[in-house]
Image (cartoon, rainbow, N blue to C red):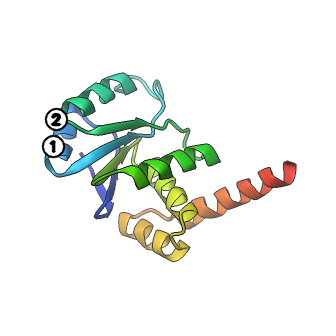
């Protein structure tokens, strides 16, 4: 399990096994977010199984499936709502951890975290978050112009 810690409340990774989920719970994680759509690739563990494992480990579990690079306002708002409502540490998963890190960055940005602080968190995790913020901002602007 290759975990990237973003801050003391949030971490990300790729796919997890049942043992990984129990290890996260033992390490103090209280909430698990799955950002990966079912059937994204062969032999992927489905949402229903991850949900059962998380419940067995006494974790809150949320399924916010998004296609990489296709982040809707609704997805970002839902991710942010989960972050704000979580008591304790949150761990999010997708294929590599980057997609859920993008959702975290967009949600926290919408909640008022500065672009500088988001960039710092991304740099610490080895991911450039400037591009996703700019692309998302541009897509929102385009969407507002169409309405």
Question: Which labelled disc corresponds to residue 100?
Answer: none
Numbered circle sitting on residue 19: 2
Task: Find residue 112 and report its image quarter.
Answer: bottom right
Q: Quadrant of residue 25?
A: top left
Give the percent coordinates (x, y) of residue 20: 20, 39
Locate residue 90 relative to residue 37 in the image: left or right. Answer: left
Q: Residues within 10 Å of mark 1 (few under 14, many from 20)?
A: few
Nearer-the-camera pick, 27 or 130: 27
Q: Position of residue 76 (x, y in %)?
A: 56, 49
The reply to whether residue 43 is visible in this rendering is no
Local secondary structure at mark 1: helix
Label 2 Cα crowd, 10 Å radius (few <14 / some 14-19 / many 20+) = few
Residue 147 versus residue 113 in the image, above or below = above
Horizontal arrangement in the rendering, residue 66 relative to residue 18 (left or right): right
Judge by depth and name the residue closer to the eye, 3 or 144.
Answer: 144
Q: CA distance from mark 1 to mark 2?
A: 6 Å
Residue 45 placement, left or right of 135: left
Q: Position of residue 49 (x, y in %)?
A: 31, 23
Mark 2: secondary structure: helix
Q: Residue at x 46, y 74 (%)?
A: 117
Q: What residue is disc 1 on?
A: 23
Image point (32%, 55%), residue name: 11
Residue 29 position (above or below residue 5): above
Residue 120 drawn at (x, y percent): 43, 73
Give the residue at x 41% y 41%. 94
| Residues at discs 1 and 2 in contact (Cβ within 8 Å) | yes
Query: Quick check: 72 left or right of 103?
Result: right
């Amino acid at each position: 399990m290759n975990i990237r810690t973003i801050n003391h409340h949030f971490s990300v990774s790729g796919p997890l096994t049942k043992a990984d989920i129990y290890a996260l719970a033992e390490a103090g994680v209280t909430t698990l977010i799955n950002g990966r759509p079912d059937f994204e690739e062969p032999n992927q563990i489905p949402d229903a199984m991850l949900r059962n494992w998380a419940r067995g480990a006494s974790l809150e579990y949320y399924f916010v499936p998004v296609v990489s690079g296709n982040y809707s306002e609704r997805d970002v708002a839902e991710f942010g709502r989960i972050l704000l409502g979580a008591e304790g540490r949150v761990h999010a998963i997708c294929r590599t951890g980057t997609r859920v890190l993008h959702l975290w960055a967009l949600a926290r940005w919408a909640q008022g975290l500065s672009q500088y602080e988001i960039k710092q968190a991304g740099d610490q995790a080895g991911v450039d978050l400037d591009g996703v913020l700019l692309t998302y901002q541009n897509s929102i602007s385009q969407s507002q112009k169409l309405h």
